[in-house]
Amino acid sequence: MSVKTLDCLGMTCPQPLMACRACLETEAPEALTVLVDDEAALENVTRFLTASGYQPSSAKDGRTWIISAARGPEAGKAPAPAVEDFPCPVPRPGERTRVVVFLTAETIGRGDDGLGGKLMGNFLKTLPELGQDLWRVVMVNGAVKLAALDSPHLDALKVLEAQGVDILVCGTCLEFFGLMDKRAVGQTTNMLDVVTSLQLATKVIDL
């Protein structure tokens, strides 16, 4: 099996992503190795290849990440995803702190759900005080209900999103609660995105 290698060292996101898309469209290789030295490129190339039906893994060698991907059974069955669907949110080292808020429920604390809901509302409305340090809000399990159409907290989440904060909503959890078609804010995500977000975060606020 031939392996196509893309040397994207020195390129910043989204250039490696665009190179990958061009390669898939013109050559559709059985296997692909992508060399990057930009954190945003590492994350987005990995996500892009997964969305394109490939099965990627990565390893680091010094300052270089080596992304290896094998063509999966779903590759080529649908058009390649748009580059615009993979923004480049990862700051370069030293630019700013990356705070991830990891939410696992629609309320805060135990004792009374009504009180817990009010606390969650106040928490979300106060998050903008973190300023540019706030990078992502990740929602799993019951927290995905916060992003649903009937959620009383949509306005607070939309304010965060408008300020450039990524809102990542677990797709498996949306499906479990029957909310896949009711997400009203953020983007549906997967466990790879969740783990990558926690890995790249400078600080995680876990509720």
Image (cartoon, rainbow, N blue to C red):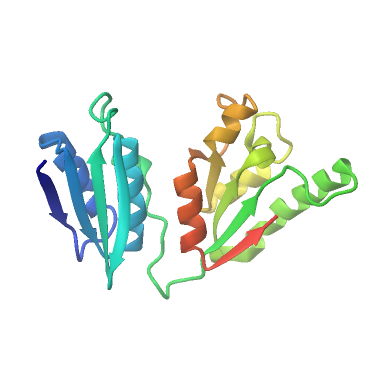
The quadrant of the rendering that contains the C terminus is: bottom right
User: x, y percentage for residue 49?
Assistant: 29, 42
Q: Residue furthest right?
A: 111
The quadrant of the rendering that contains the N terminus is: top left
User: x, y percentage for residue 121?
Assistant: 76, 47
Position of 192 relative to 74 (above/below): below
For residue 147, side relative to residue 171 (left or right): right
User: x, y percentage for residue 63?
Assistant: 28, 71
Residue occupying the point 56% across, 40% down: 169
Residue occupying the point 77% across, 45% down: 107
Nearest the viewer among 195 and 12 is 195
Q: How many marks?
A: 0
Position of 22 relative to 202 (above/below): above
Residue occupying the point 33% across, 48% down: 46
For residue 119, side relative to residue 36 (left or right): right
Q: Residue furthest bottom?
A: 94
User: x, y percentage for residue 21?
Assistant: 21, 41
Question: Can see residue 126?
Answer: yes
For residue 83, side relative to residue 125 (left or right): left
Please tell me in which quadrant of the rendered image residue 150 appears.
top right
Please tell me in which quadrant of the rendered image residue 13 appears.
bottom left
Question: Can see residue 154?
Answer: no
Position of 45 relative to 55 (above/below): below
Nearest the viewer among 190 and 164 is 190
For residue 103, side relative to residue 185 (left or right): right
Please tell me in which quadrant of the rendered image residue 83 appears.
top left
Residue occupying the point 57% across, 38% down: 185
